[in-house]
Amino acid sequence: MNRERWCALRPDREDGIALVLAVLIFAVMTIMTVAMIGYTSASSRDASLKDAGQRAYALAEAGLNQGLAQLASHYYESSGKATNSSAAFATSWFTGFASSQQSPNSATACTSSSTCMSWSLVSCSFYLPISGCSTSTGSGGTTQGTVVLKGTGTVPNPTGASPLTRTVTTKVDVTQPPQLVATPQYWMEIYTGAPPSGNCDLSLGQGVTITAPLYVAGNLCLTSSASVSGSNVDLKVLGWTWLRQSSVIGSQSGSPPRVKTAQIAGGCSNNNNQQPTMSSGCTINKSSGSIWDNTPSTQHSPTTPTPETLPTIDWSWVQNAQTNSVPAPSCTNGRSLSEPTFALTPTTSYTCTSAIGSIKYTYNPSGLSTLVISGDVYFSGSLSVDTRNTLVQYSGVGAVFVAGSITTANNSFLCVQVANGTCDFANATNSGSSGYWDPTKSLLLLQSQGAITATNLRFQGGIYGATSISLLGGQGCTQGPLVTPNTLIVGQQLNGSFPTFPAVPAGSLGTPPPPYNLTAPYGGTY
């Protein structure tokens, strides 16, 4: 065999291997390319789906925020001030339970191929019956109920399948915490609305010194050195005014100080034996007279005051407070705010609480008993005060509403500050004294639908009686505004000098009840 034939038959020859390798490499590259294209396509679809899902969530959150905004608009004004004091909640406040639009910036109606955001009410639960809401049980403190809202977002599916939908929900509590409001004028003055009767309709006698604004719808009589004075005092009398036995309204010398204005519709007299009439005339700043004001002119005729009408309280609410309050009030030691006559200062301690107010009394048989008031407290019956000749010091800012009457036992005490066995009346307006009455820390307003009758009561605070106020006895003394649309009897002692109340509890005479508020959203789900 020649050399050439032998070489051709050798098994280790490599002729044609390049073609095999080329085919293999091409096949691998084809597989890798297909895999890469498949992976890229899958990643793109996944990214598109995730992006669409995020947009759906964003739309759902936008819808939820729209629902929250609609809800808040019924509780707050544009500046954020709480204004809703009439209704805790109503399902009709929403523009439909499935309101929808294409986006936050487009109110165009949704279509099958467009984006869409919507909001709806999932549930509502309140302590008082509300149409469309379930009724809660138990105690909620200031919380009146809970609202659950849902937002839904929908976007077209980038894969062509069914649209992508996402939902978010959140809870919001409705609360009604106690609140202070600006003080109306009548809580800064002595006010009696009894019309002129032909005789004295308000009599100020021995020991009565008024240095607060005074409004008398009838006739005013001063005897036994009683006085009305003060540079910030507006005196308004719609009847006539009679001053006897060295009584004065201001003075020419400035001691006591002249009143700011003396407005008297009828006549006036300082003759002990001559009662004025409506037509007998009156001269202010008259050298022989007893009425002096700070009007720039010397002798002048008084202006006729404008009648002031008191607002009213919805006493039906007070009468039904135990069932209307949310939640129902509760008391310790067997007490109840619905007792026929509630003893405010008994020989036992107790605490009563409701959604918008509380009262705590601590009895001390051998020393100073204390009472702490906060917010509004409603009594569906009457109220009695009997401190058994011992001192009771109160603190806190609150208003008491009594559907019946208020009576106090002889020689009862309700003081802000105490000194020498009684209320510290002398230092109440002295901000530098330990006896100063700070009405931002201690202020009690007693308000009654029935008559208010007290004998030798020592009290620092405000009193309103829808029927009448009668403060009898020669040792008693009250310090603070006295307000009634009817008869006011002040007895022989009255300290008409009291600090200005910068605020009073919401819900007291002439002011709306505390407004409802919303808590921050919580408990969200995605």
Image (cartoon, grey):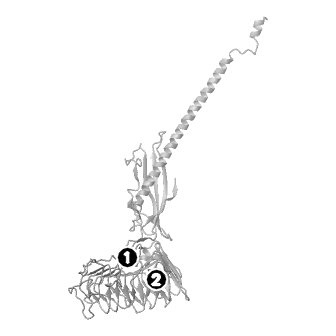
The kind of residue on which mark 1 rests is Leu
Q: For residue 409, which quarter of the picture?
A: bottom left
Circle 1 SS class: loop
Q: Would residue 450 be seen by someone viewing this image from the given angle?
A: no
The quarter in which the N terminus is drawn is top right
Count of numbered circles on the image = 2
Q: Which residue occupies the foreground of this view, 172 or 99?
A: 172
Residue 40, given in percent of the width and then of the height, sits at 56, 34
Residue 256, given in percent of the width and then of the height, sits at 36, 85
The kind of residue on which mark 2 rests is Asn
Give yes or no for contact between labels 1 and 2 (Cβ–Cβ under 8 Å). no
Label 1 crowd bin: few (<14), some (14–19), many (20+), radius 10 Å = many
Q: CA distance from mark 1 to mark 2?
A: 27 Å
Q: Nearer the viewer, mark 1 or mark 2?
A: 2
Q: Residue at x 32, y 87 (%)?
A: 248
Q: Which residue occupies the foreground of this view, 520 or 262?
A: 262
Q: Which residue occupies the foreground of this view, 172 or 520?
A: 520
Question: Would residue 454 be found to the left or right of residue 13 on screen?
Answer: left
* Residue annotated with mark 2: 427
Circle 2 SS class: loop
- Residue 368 circle label: none
State whether residue 273 is above or below residue 332: below
Label 2 crowd bin: few (<14), some (14–19), many (20+), radius 10 Å = some
N-terminal of the two: label 1 or label 2?
Answer: 2
State whether residue 363 is above or below residue 68: below
Residue 189, given in percent of the width and then of the height, sits at 36, 79
* Residue annotated with mark 1: 509
Q: Which residue lies most toward the right here?
A: 1
Residue 299, given in percent of the width and then of the height, sits at 24, 82
Q: Which residue lies most toward the bottom here?
A: 273
